[in-house]
Image (cartoon, helix red, strand yellow):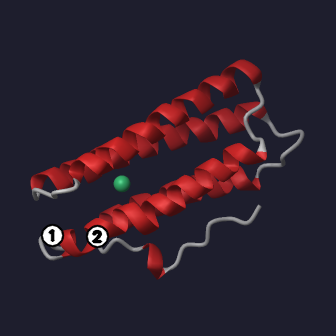
């Protein structure tokens, strides 16, 4: 599977959020890099754990920033984030229980969810935030 290639189209216009998005994309790319068979389950668990931490931290900060500035579509962001958190928790459970978490559909889910989230959902707040927040 091809990795996610970061370019300017991913930028939401806020440096700190871009940095966090890049970190998350980096973690997903590491997962895409893992061999699909004969992968090290401990390594995969470690990567998923990292993804959980990064995502939680990032969602919290993003939601805080949007709330602070009275973003009208905050609820939609919170719902999306919540959906991802639940899904990721399930993936982590599977990974711990079965040691089989790298099937292609999992990678596809992570890749598609984040690509769509950043490029479509987050991009909606770009014009709103960039006018209000200094970089
Ligand atoms: Fe978001």
Q: At 24% across and 46% down in the image, what residue appears?
A: 75
Extreme-right residue of the structure: 38
For ligand 1, give the image quadrant.
bottom left
Assign a secondary structure to mark 2.
Answer: loop
Left or right: 67 in relation to 79: left
Q: Which mark is residue 62?
A: none
Closest to the observer: 26 or 114?
A: 114
Q: Counting other residues with Cα less than 10 Å from the Cα at mark 2, is it few (<14), some (14-19), or many (20 or more)? A: some
Q: CA distance from mark 2 to mark 1?
A: 8 Å
Left or right: 3 in relation to 69: right
Left or right: 131 in relation to 23: left
Q: At 54% across and 73% down in the image, what residue appears?
A: 6
Upstream in sequence: badge 2 or badge 1: 2
Closest to the observer: 40 or 76?
A: 76
Looking at the picture, does residue 71 appear above or below residue 58?
below
Q: Position of residue 82 (x, y in %)?
A: 38, 38
Q: Position of residue 41 (x, y in %)?
A: 76, 32
Q: Position of residue 12 (x, y in %)?
A: 34, 71
Looking at the picture, does residue 66 appear above or below residue 19?
above
The quarter holding residue 49 reads top right
Q: Is there CB contact under 8 Å for labels 2 and 1?
A: yes
Look at the image and tell me whether residue 57 can be seen. Answer: no
The quarter holding residue 26 reads bottom right
Look at the image and tell me whether residue 63 can be seen. Answer: yes
Assign a secondary structure to mark 1.
Answer: loop
Q: At 20% across and 48% down in the image, what residue appears?
A: 64
Asked whether mark 1 and ligand 1 are closer than 8 Å, the reply comes as: no
Q: Name the residue carrying label 1.
A: 133
Extreme-bottom residue of the structure: 8
Closest to the observer: 112 or 132?
A: 112
Q: Name the residue carrying label 2.
A: 14
């Amino acid at each position: 599977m091809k990795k996610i290639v970061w370019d300017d189209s991913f930028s939401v216009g806020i440096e700190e959020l871009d940095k966090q998005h890049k970190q998350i994309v980096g973690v997903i790319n590491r997962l895409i890099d893992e061999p699909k068979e004969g992968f090290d389950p401990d390594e995969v668990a470690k990567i998923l754990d990292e993804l959980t931490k990064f995502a939680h931290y990032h969602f919290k900060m993003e939601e805080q920033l949007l709330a602070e500035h009275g973003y009208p579509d905050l609820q939609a962001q919170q719902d999306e984030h919540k959906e991802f958190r639940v899904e990721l928790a399930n993936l982590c459970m599977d990974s711990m229980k079965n040691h089989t978490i790298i099937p292609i559909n999992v990678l596809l889910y992570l890749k598609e969810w984040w690509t769509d989230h950043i490029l479509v959902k987050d991009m909606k707040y770009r014009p709103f935030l960039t006018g209000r927040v200094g970089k």
